[in-house]
Image (cartoon, rainbow, N blue to C red):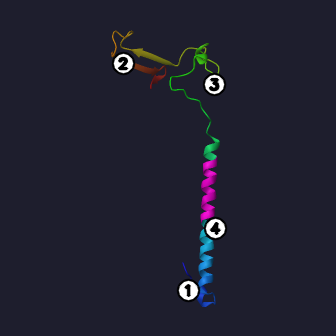
Amino acid sequence: MINPLRLVSGDSFYEQASYSTSFHRRRLRHRALIQLAAVACLLAFLKPAASFPSGAPESACKDLKPGHGVEAQTGASPFELTQDKLQVEQAGDQIKGKVEGKMGRL
């Protein structure tokens, strides 16, 4: 935006336009740096993960322990699972289940 007071003080139109352009360039550069910093922060929290279309490899199931640095749970489960059937009788049968926490319903 051209400031009429600056034009009166002796600045030419081109000098005023140049000032305005450099201001907008600095502002855009500042905005781009903020966006770049935000993306860098988001990328810093991402962890690579391997996924397999047919599930985990056989080697992951040999000892039935989690392989992500956490020891297996040795105590009782804090949840209770109930279902309306214990077996599937034919293909397409559905089993309804409910998961409840021992301290209340989830």
User: Which circle's residue, 1 or 3, is located before the other in the chain?
Assistant: 1
User: Which circle's residue, 4 or 1, is located before the other in the chain?
Assistant: 1
Circle 1 residue: 4
Question: Dot 3 lies on which element?
Answer: loop
Classified by dominant secondary structure, the portion drawn in magenta counts as helix
Residue 68, numbered label: 3
Q: Position of residue 63 (x, y in %)?
A: 62, 13
Give the magenta part as a residue range: 28-40
CA gap, disc 1 and disc 2: 76 Å
Residue 94 drawn above or below residue 9 = above
In the picture as drawn, the residue positioned furthest to the front comes out as 53
Circle 2 residue: 96
Q: Residue at x 59, y 76 (%)?
A: 20
Residue 26, numbered label: 4
Mark 4 neighbour density, 10 Å: few (under 14) some (14–19) many (20 or more): few
Quadrant into which the C terminus falls = top left
Q: Position of residue 26 (x, y in %)?
A: 63, 67
What residue type is disc 3 on? Answer: His
What residue type is disc 2 on? Answer: Lys
In the visual, does 62 lie left or right of 102? right
Corner quadrant of residue 104: top left
What residue type is disc 4 on? Answer: Arg
User: Which circle's residue, 3 or 4, is located before the other in the chain?
Assistant: 4
Q: Position of residue 60 (x, y in %)?
A: 60, 18
Q: Residue at x 62, y 78 (%)?
A: 18
Q: Residue at x 59, y 70 (%)?
A: 24
